[in-house]
């Protein structure tokens, strides 16, 4: 019974570590993709550049977490997953402002 509990704990730690690396890496990739959008429609330009600037401010934090290698708590991983969802929504918005129809905007 103890062996099973220890195996499950070890398995959980390995999954947690993989989830941690995956979510941080995906945040960095999304941030880089957001930074690649260059020009926005005149009516949204200021707001878009402001959003990109704010997202890029998180880049040093994400790099530090990725390079540090310290384990994150499950709560932290959950928060980073929520941040990933917000980054994806911001990416979709910025892509629309970058290449979307003038009439639609």
Image (cartoon, rainbow, N blue to C red):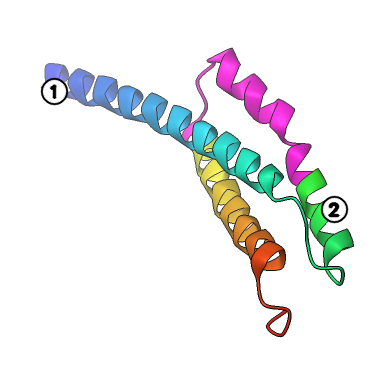
**In this rendering, is residue 100 above or below 75?**
below
Of residues 102 and 79, the one nearer the viewer is 102
Query: Residue 41 lies in what quarter of the image?
Result: bottom right
Which residue appears at 56% of the width and 47% of the height? 84
Q: What element carries label 1?
A: helix
Look at the image and tell me in which quarter the C terminus lies. Answer: bottom right
Which mark is on residue 50? 2
Q: Tell me the CA gap for discs 1 and 2.
A: 51 Å
At x 32%, y 29%, the residue is 15
N-terminal-most mark, 1 or 2 = 1
**Residue 72 magenta-drawn?**
yes
Residue position for label 1: 4
| Residue at 68% from the left image edge and 60% from the top image edge | 94
Span colored in magenta: 54-74
2 to 93, vertically: above or below:
above
Q: Percent x, y for residue 4?
A: 13, 23
Return the residue nearer the eye: 50 or 24.
50
Give the x, y percent position of residue 77: 50, 37
Q: Which of 48 and 8 is in front in this view?
A: 48
Residue 91 horizontal/vertical position (percent): 62, 55
Which residue is depicted at the point 22% across and 18% down?
6
The answer to whether residue 14 is above or below residue 104 is: above
Specify the label residue 83 is tagged with: none
Disc 1 and disc 2 in contact, CB within 8 angstroms? no
Picture quadrant of residue 22: top left
Mark 1 packing: few (<14 Cα in 10 Å), some, or many (20+)? few
Q: In this picture, is 78 found above or below 102? A: above
């Amino acid at each position: 019974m103890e062996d099973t509990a220890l195996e499950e704990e070890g398995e959980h730690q390995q999954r947690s570590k993989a989830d941690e690396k995956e979510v941080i890496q995906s945040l960095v990739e999304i941030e880089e993709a957001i930074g690649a959008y260059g020009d926005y429609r005149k009516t949204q330009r200021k707001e878009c550049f402001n959003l990109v600037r704010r997202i890029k401010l998180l880049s040093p934090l994400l790099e530090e977490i990725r390079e540090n290698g310290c384990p994150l708590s499950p709560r932290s991983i959950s928060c980073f997953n929520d941040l990933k969802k917000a980054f994806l929504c911001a990416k979709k918005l910025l892509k629309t402002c970058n290449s979307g129809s003038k009439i639609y905007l």
